[in-house]
Amino acid sequence: MTVSWTPHRFAGGALALDTANTVVLRGDSQRSFDRFADPAEIARFARAASTFRASELGGRTLVVSDPEAVSPLVLSIREATDRLFRGFVLSGSASAGDAAELLRLCADGLAAARGEGLFAPGRPFGDPSEPLAFEAALAVSALSLLAGTAIARIRICPNCNWLFLDRSRNSSRLWCDMAVCGNRQKASRHYRRRKAVREVDDA
């Protein structure tokens, strides 16, 4: 089924985290599913990311030349990204093994950039006038999260289990998307309170 790549799908705050979040409801074996199960969705996601992640990408357009061919590498980078950053949030440090694996896969992703200049000051994704291979951009995004202080601002949404970057001034953001997960949690708490009141009244 074709995925609607809406702004909510990019609530992670960074391309690497948005990509990790294409596995929905991680940890729930009964309900979890992969939005990249159809490789064609990788190309559609990359096109949407060019718009919704334009600020992070410096206006650079992402391309996927052959979804079937790049799918194994993209999925490997995605899973390594999730393992490392989720592990960091849960334990407060990154596993050396997870870091080594992510760095190895990112090196493979960067090879798709074919020697183009990347990581320039203020322009890590390079020249915005030329398209960039999605797997290379994915590597740049993941490495950028590792290189600075951003890793300390990564959170796990308590509603959907997505990873997200907390850019709030006092680092107090709870939800990946207040309009979706925040409101769902509020509605759930309201329902539980009303149910508890009804049970007391019926007792």
Image (tube, helix red, strand yellow):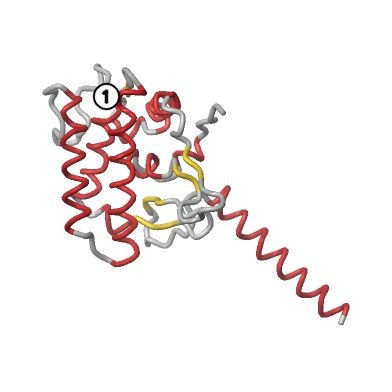
| Rendered position, 203 above or below 157 | below
| Residue at mark 1 | 133
The residue located at (45%, 27%) in the rendering is 41
The residue located at (44%, 51%) in the rendering is 162
Q: Is residue 6 visible?
A: yes
Q: Nearer the viewer, residue 60 or 188?
A: 188
Residue 61 sits in which quadrant?
Answer: top left
The local secondary structure at tag 1 comes to strand
Q: Position of residue 81 (x, y in %)?
A: 30, 47
| Rendered position, 188 above or below 148 | below
Q: Quadrant of the C terminus?
A: bottom right
Q: Is residue 123 visible?
A: no
Q: Residue pushed farthest bottom? A: 203
Residue 105 sits in which quadrant?
Answer: top left
Q: Position of residue 49 (x, y in %)?
A: 39, 30
Left or right: residue 9 compared with residue 126: right
| Rendered position, 92 above or below 124 | below
Q: Amino acid at mark 1?
A: Ala
Q: Position of residue 116 (x, y in %)?
A: 14, 23
Q: Nearer the viewer, residue 124 or 102?
A: 102
Q: How many marks?
A: 1
The residue located at (44%, 58%) in the rendering is 173
Left or right: residue 186 compared with residue 57: right
Left or right: residue 173 compared with residue 115: right
